[in-house]
Image: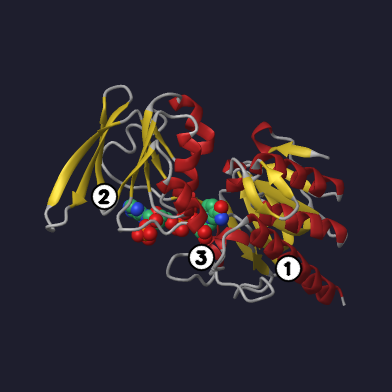
Amino acid sequence: MVRHNYKGGNHEKIEYDVLILGAGPAGLTAAIYCGRYRLKTAVVAKSFGGTANLAGELENWPGFIGSGFDLMEKFKSHAEKFGARFLQAEVSDVRKEKDRFVLEIGDKEIHGKSLIVALGTEHRKLNIPGEKKFAGKGVSYCATCDANFFNGKDVAVIGGADSAAKAALYLAEIARKVYISYRKNEMRCEPISLKKIENHKKIEIYYQSVPLKIEGDNAVKHLVLEQEQKDGKMKKIKLDVSGVFVVIGATPVVDIVKNLGLKMDKGGYIITDKEGKTNVSGVFAAGDVTDNKLKQVVTASAEGAIAAKSAYEKLKFMCK
Ligand code: NDP
């Protein structure tokens, strides 16, 4: 495999058949399929594995139970085996010039005949006082990455869906106490997780609560919540915690492709048809960045495969 790190130079001006933006399950699967279609393929990403890397224990990739990181390593070596070229770089601009796509990377450019956008999502922020100040000093967006810093300590998880549930259960294995703050009156995670949470001695849930601020000195010391009481009055609650895990979903990473004129839904997710086609000819999208309903490794991978097939068919047609 040839790996180019554009920060260190080493530029070659090559035109690819397919440029894949993003190297999570969607991008990596697209790379495997493009390779098998014998398309000259470049995968461009800041890092490899995407948010799947953060899944401690993946239990719903058929035939595999293990860490998301390990599975992504397998995806990557699989894609490499079929000739995908990996460019670890930050793309500053993406544009279409006639029937070609151009990725700007620093002062360099790479060109491709088609583009698969598989940029995934990034963590949503609370935007409350203290969140930014204590990021990396107690505020975290990834339990599986940071749980070990909170061995024997008290932590809080904000959120009430699947990721928050998983994070709380994972943290409860390591921390002394895990508080969950959720704005509604019943968590909407998978029932199997909810049952585990409700039966867990270390986990305490504050329903109908919203976080107001995170306080501390050099690191997080308190989370201040506001909880609606039975009489409708609001009560302030100050939790003594060393860690606050913000697990409130994600937003699609679409900024760098905004100049392409891709149609998006109201959440900013790229609208695709069943073949992974977008409204822009030659641009396909796959995985969590699309308006799909189920955001899982298995669906992202399937969409990556479909986008690759569509790109292949489009290129075949162009060659005729
Ligand atoms: P979701 O978008 O599903 O949930 C986000 C959670 O954060 C919701 O509970 C939401 O509240 C809450 N929230 C959003 N914004 C705020 C805010 N500003 N302040 C406070 N709370 C907020 O994200 P997930 O990451 O949990 O899940 C994403 C997808 O991945 C889903 O499809 C999920 O099923 C899937 N997934 C599956 C897993 C599995 O093991 N099967 C594991 C992890 C994720 P509200 O409920 O009120 O909207």
Which amino acid type corresponds to the residue marked 1 in the rendered image?
Answer: Ile
Q: Are marks 3 and 1 in contact (CB under 8 Å)?
A: no
Residue under label 3, please give it. Answer: 269
Q: Is residue 254 visible?
A: no
Mark 3 to mark 2 CA distance (whole Å): 26 Å
* SS of the residue under disc 3: loop
| Mark sitting on residue 235 | none
Label 2 CB-ligand 1 distance < 8 A: yes
Other-residue count near label 1 (Cα within 10 Å), few / some / many at <14 / 14–19 / ≥20: many
- The numbered dot on residue 210 is 2
Please identify the quadrant where the N terminus is shown.
top right
Residue at 66 percent of width and 73 percent of height? 277
Tell me which label, 3 or 1, sits earlier in the chain.
3
Amino acid bearing label 3:
Tyr
Earlier residue among tags 1 and 2: 2
Residue matched to label 1: 306
Residue 279 placement: quadrant: bottom right
Relative to 60, residue 77 above or below:
above
Q: Looking at the picture, how far across and down is residue 302, in whole percent? A: 70, 63
Residue 160: horizontal and vertical position, in percent? 39, 53
Residue at 16% across, 56% down: 230
Task: Residue at the far top: name it.
Answer: 218
